[in-house]
């Protein structure tokens, strides 16, 4: 296994340890230094050499202070031995085994290399790739772990300025240039392969993202003294540059949108908010308007690439151009209405003189772009209000851009004017640095690969590939110039081909994104490939259409054959089954008749039982009614006897009183008793009234009220009272009672009451049973 492959295994294991929360980020990154420590074994530890080695291996920007910061950690873990209080010696021998993680990624790398080896020769005919398998593997790993690395020229210049002695240069010469810059053609080849691999073989994505995260880790390696603990809450306000805002809106393509969206969602989860300045909205409108004003053949840039791929529509681009604030509000980003005159009391944090000086430091061709960058830097520093910190999440405000020159000039200017220190967070940071911070500070991963939090590294990898594969106007312009010189009659067709994504993609593949590969000698080859790319799509569509038609005809023939066979089988089955059907019908009818007969017999038996039961119930009821009637008759007779006795006593008393009064009246007449006696007067008056009453009633032939009537009424009254007291219905018996002088007798014995009528259901059942 070559050194660069061993580096990949080491990187994979180091990043894997991050997801388990073991130690901190600094300890997890120590394995990246092992190749340097192996080369310097037995020699005095020199932080300067370690910094150079990290740059040579990974292309990372690391200074002496960073390497010196690691001395105590290396000493604790046994990589160094203390010779004197101020001198440390390297003592490191590499282990023979690579561990389980190393074995796994080594196997995965072999499988990915198989895919790469089959893919590489198919990309371009005019610039064929003839690298060996091991070279392809190292090429791919180098691209993955150094997505954002510095160029080879920058590394060489830095080594030259270091003026190392011979021994230290020998140490560096033992290290492979893992961070050696790839040629543009090879970068394009790797990006093209990875984009197809991510789309067609998603099972490799977690491993690729883990290796690509080494490029993200480079941002943290630049300044290890920054906090690396996982954040739970932050009040950081992230100010988006115009290109970053366009990425978030999807105007730079799906890959760029997903890349920044993962970062935004991770930071929003811990409380960060996102804004855009009005000057950035103006720049968004200017950039989109300038692109849309150009003819189709002269348009270029990420927005036009996304339009050509069909990832964004021109109507949406124009809508964003006309009202960027409304579009940003749709994705949860507000526009903060501030300018250089909004907060006069904060000018002291970035004065007008500072603004003019920074404006002159920007060498952009567009005055609007220079004013935008200077204004954005000034407003960010003023919004910070003098806050200084080495922790990105405590910086209050930070301006995020994708322009490394803008970031470097703004950082150097603020350091030079003592607005921030060397280790402080600058006002302007790169999007990839924020992505790394979001990945490290919001949690690395779950407990296994299935739940691993690789969204940010994965989207960073895909977005980096898309940036490499972006259509370069230099290539299209080279083709346009060559055609103008050789075949100007093809220019109109070339403009049409440039509006087709397949033709443009084929052009970039054939040239590997390099305009120098466009020559008069191969222009015909490029022309044919571009036309064939469009025609190939049509041919493929026609072939698929013919295959579909052929399959449809075959299916139709097969269906007809199966239909005929099924019809014949159905006829035979119908003929054979008709007799069986009739027999089954007759058998079913017989069984149904028997079942119906059995059911009728059961119904007759049930109704007969109901009739018998009804007769028994009726007889029992008649018996109970008669018994109740007899008891009531006995009670009435007893009541009549008692009332008759009482009435007889009343009759006797009344007769005696009348006889006595009569005797008194006769005695007074016979013996001549004085008429002044009151008693005699009363008696005389009573007889006089009685005689007058009877004479009048007799004369008028009306019924007379006598002692008999009084006794009869009294007897009836007492009889009714007795009925009520006994709870007996008087209407049932009163008409059968005869009263004579208060004596009660039966005129005739009352019959028992009629039986109650049965209920409707019982009556129906009884009638049916009958």
Image (spheres, helix red, strand yellow):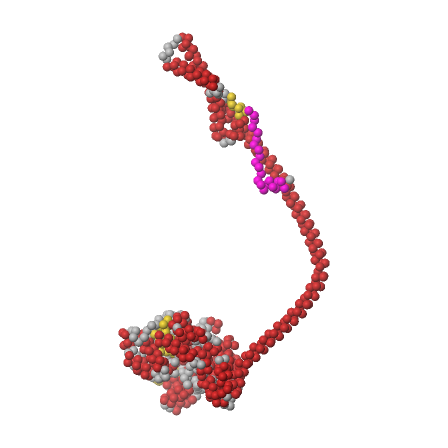
User: Which quarter of the image is occupied by the C terminus?
Assistant: top right
Tell me if 184 is positioned left or right of 118 in this view: left
Name the quadrant containing residue 691.
top left
Q: Position of residue 676 (x, y in %)?
A: 36, 12
Tell me if residue 423 comes above or below residue 690 in the rendering: below
Tell me if residue 297 comes above or below residue 327 in the rendering: below
Residue 621 in sight in this render: yes
Residue drawn at the location 48% of the way across and 88% of the way down: 484
- Comparing 511 with 67, the one in front is 511
Q: Position of residue 158 (x, y in %)?
A: 38, 87
- Comparing 331 with 317, the one in front is 317
Name the quadrant containing residue 627.
top right
Q: Is residue 752 magenta?
A: yes
Q: Residue furthest top?
A: 671
Q: Is residue 585 magenta?
A: no
Residue 103 in sight in this render: no
Q: Position of residue 606 (x, y in %)?
A: 63, 43
- Comparing 117 with 239, the one in front is 239
- Comparing 43 with 711, the one in front is 711
Tell me if 245 is positioned left or right of 606 in this view: left
Q: Which residues are magenta?
A: 747-768
Residue drawn at the location 66% of the way across and 47% of the way down: 599
Q: Position of residue 371 (x, y in %)?
A: 34, 80
Residue drawn at the location 50% of the way across and 20% of the way down: 741
Residue drawn at the location 46% of the way across and 81% of the way down: 296
Q: Residue furthest bottom?
A: 166
What is the total number of numbered labels drawn onto the structure image? 0
Tell me if 197 is positioned left or right of 169 in this view: right
């Amino acid at each position: 296994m070559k050194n660069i492959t061993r580096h990949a295994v080491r990187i994979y294991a180091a990043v894997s340890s991050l997801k388990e929360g073991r130690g901190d980020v600094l300890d997890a990154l120590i394995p990246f230094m092992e190749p340097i420590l192996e080369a310097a074994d037995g020699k005095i530890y020199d932080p300067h050499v370690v910094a150079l080695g990290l740059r040579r291996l990974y292309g990372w920007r690391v200074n002496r202070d960073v390497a010196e910061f690691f001395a105590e950690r290396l000493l604790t873990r046994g990589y160094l031995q203390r010779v004197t209080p101020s001198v440390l010696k390297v003592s490191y021998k590499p282990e023979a085994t690579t561990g389980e993680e190393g074995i796994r990624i080594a196997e995965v790398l072999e499988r990915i290399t198989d895919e790469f080896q089959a893919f590489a020769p198919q990309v371009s005919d005019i610039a064929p790739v003839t690298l060996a398998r091991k070279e392809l593997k190292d090429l791919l790993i180098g691209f993955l772990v150094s997505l954002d690395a510095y160029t080879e020229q920058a590394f060489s210049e830095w080594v030259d300025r270091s003026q190392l002695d011979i021994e230290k240069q020998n140490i560096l010469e033992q290290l492979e240039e893992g961070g050696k810059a790839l040629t543009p053609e090879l970068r394009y080849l790797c990006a093209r392969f990875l984009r197809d691999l991510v789309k067609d073989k998603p099972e490799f994505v977690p491993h690729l993202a883990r290796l690509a995260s080494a490029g993200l880790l480079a941002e943290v390696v630049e300044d290890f003294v920054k906090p690396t603990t996982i954040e739970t809450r932050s009040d950081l306000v992230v100010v988006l540059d115009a290109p970053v805002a366009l990425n978030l809106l999807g105007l730079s393509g799906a890959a760029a949108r997903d890349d920044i969206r993962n970062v935004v969602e991770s930071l929003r989860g811990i409380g960060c908010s996102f804004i855009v300045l009005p000057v950035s909205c103006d720049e968004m409108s200017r950039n989109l308007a300038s692109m849309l004003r150009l003819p189709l053949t002269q348009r270029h840039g990420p927005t036009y690439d996304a339009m050509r791929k069909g990832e964004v529509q021109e109507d949406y681009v124009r809508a964003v151009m006309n009202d960027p604030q409304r579009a940003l509000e749709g994705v949860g980003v507000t526009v903060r209405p501030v300018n250089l005159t909004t907060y006069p009391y904060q000018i002291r944090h970035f004065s007008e003189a500072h603004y003019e000086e920074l404006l002159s430091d920007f060498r952009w061709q567009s005055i609007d772009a220079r004013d935008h960058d200077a204004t954005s830097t000034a407003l960010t520093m003023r919004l910070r209000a003098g806050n200084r910190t080495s922790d990105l999440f405590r910086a209050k405000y930070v301006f995020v851009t994708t322009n490394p020159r803008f970031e470097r000039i703004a950082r150097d200017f603020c350091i030079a004017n003592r607005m921030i220190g060397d280790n402080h967070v600058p006002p302007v940071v790169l999007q990839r640095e924020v992505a790394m911070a979001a990945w490290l500070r919001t949690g690395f991963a779950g407990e296994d690969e299935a739940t691993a939090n690789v969204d940010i590294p994965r989207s960073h990898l895909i977005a980096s590939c898309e940036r490499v594969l972006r259509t370069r106007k230099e290539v299209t312009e080279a083709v346009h110039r060559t055609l103008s010189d050789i075949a100007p009659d093809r220019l109109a067709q070339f403009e049409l081909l440039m509006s087709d994504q397949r033709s443009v993609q084929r052009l970039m593949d054939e040239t590997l994104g390099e305009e120098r590969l466009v020559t008069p000698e191969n222009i015909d080859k490029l022309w044919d490939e571009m036309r064939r790319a469009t025609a190939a799509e049509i041919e493929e569509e026609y072939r698929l259409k013919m295959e579909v038609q052929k399959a449809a005809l075959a299916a139709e023939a097969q269906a007809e054959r199966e239909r005929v066979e099924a019809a014949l089988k159905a006829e035979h089955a119908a003929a054979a089954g008709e007799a069986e059907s009739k027999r089954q019908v007759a058998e079913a009818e017989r069984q149904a008749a028997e079942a119906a007969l059995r059911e009728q017999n059961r119904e007759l038996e049930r109704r007969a039982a109901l009739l018998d039961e009804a007769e028994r119930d009726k007889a029992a009821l008649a018996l109970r009614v008669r018994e109740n009637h007899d008891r009531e008759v006995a009670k009435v007779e007893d009541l009549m006897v008692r009332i008759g006795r009482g009435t007889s006593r009343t009759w006797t008393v009344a007769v005696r009183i009348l006889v006595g009064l009569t005797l008194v009246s006769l005695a007074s007449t016979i013996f001549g008793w004085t008429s002044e006696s009151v008693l005699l007067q009363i008696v005389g008056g009573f007889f006089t009234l009685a005689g007058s009453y009877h004479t009048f009633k007799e004369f008028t032939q009306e019924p007379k009220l006598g002692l008999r009537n009084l006794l009869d009424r009294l007897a009836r009254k007492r009889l009714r009272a007795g009925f009520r007291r006994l709870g007996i219905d008087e209407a049932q018996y009163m008409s059968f009672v005869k009263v004579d002088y208060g004596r009660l007798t039966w005129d005739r014995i009352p019959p028992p009451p009629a039986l109650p009528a049965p209920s409707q259901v019982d009556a129906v059942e009884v009638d049916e049973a009958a």
